[in-house]
Image (spheres, rainbow, N blue to C red):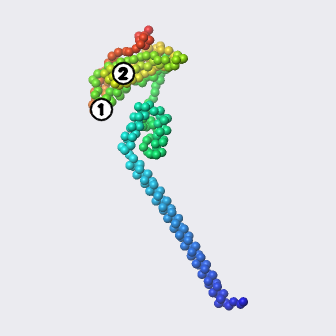
Amino acid sequence: MKRSGGFRRKVIAKYRKLQETSENKIIQKNQESNSCSFSSDLTETFLEEASNEDQENWCETHTEDENYEFRENIRQWAVKCNIPQAHLHDLFSIINKRLPFVLPKDPRTLLKTNALEICISSICSGHYWHNGLKIQLKNILEEIIEVPTQISLNINIDGLPIYNSSRHQLWPILCNIFELSNISPIVIGIYEGQSKPSDLSAYLGPTVSELKELENGLDVTTKQGKSCKVDVKVRAFLCDSPARALIKGK
């Protein structure tokens, strides 16, 4: 069949119109897709910002004051029950997963453990650790409500075997305050060796030096913020027979 030129032109015109319509639909779909993508990005950004804002607000509301009592209860329980730091670390990790920022990661932060240098001296074929007398008395007196004007010290020295089948033994120097019987004895120093300390000056020297300093009194600051001087005297040395012979140099 023979087609006229007018018919051919109509067909070409319709074909071009179909092409333009298809291209417009494709452009419109792309625009809708881009709009959806932009909207999705906007939503994700908004949610992320909202999440961050919630977290910041949560951190701000959970202040030190609000969690202080809880942390203090945990600290007192850990000290009273002598909980190992490794167990506290595991406990804090579990709690922090559920309640972040409430407890520190390191138990030493909560327990207020000071990184003090421990000095151990080699004496008499053994080792001696001096914990100190003056600083411990000062800490005790500054924590009580009514500070006495005078205190009397009972000092105890005794030898203790570490194992039944070993010659290793400890010779601690202990002290308690006669006027404050409710206060636990304090450890002034500890000697460790295969036998009793043979050099009495090296063993008792640090303690004797502090006792001489305390003859002039001990300056303390009371809970009320007042400064006062406490007279310190040695009341007695409480020792068994071997320890008595040791301090007498026999």
Marker disc for residue 176: 2
Residue ID at (30%, 32%): 223
Residue ID at (31%, 26%): 219
Number of residues whose C-alpha sits closer than 10 Å to that of mark 1, classed few (under 14), some (14–19) or many (20 or more): some
Q: Is residue 140 visible?
A: yes
Rendered view: 113 above or below 126: below
Location of residue 158 in the rendering, given as x and y in whole percent from the top left corner: 43, 16
Number of residues whose C-alpha sits closer than 10 Å to that of mark 2, classed few (under 14), some (14–19) or many (20 or more): many
Q: Nearer the viewer, residue 70 or 201?
A: 70
Location of residue 56 in the rendering, given as x and y in whole percent from the top left corner: 42, 51
Q: Nearer the viewer, residue 189 or 78?
A: 78
Rendered view: 121 above or below 10: above
Marker disc for residue 223: 1
Q: Amino acid at mark 1?
A: Lys
Q: Residue furthest right?
A: 1
Location of residue 8 in the rendering, given as x and y in whole percent from the top left corner: 66, 87
Q: Secondary structure at mark 2?
A: strand
Q: Nearer the viewer, residue 91 or 17?
A: 91
Query: Is 10 left, or right, of 180 in this rendering?
Result: right
Mark closer to the chain start, 1 or 2: 2
Marker disc for residue 187: none
Q: Amino acid at mark 2?
A: Asn
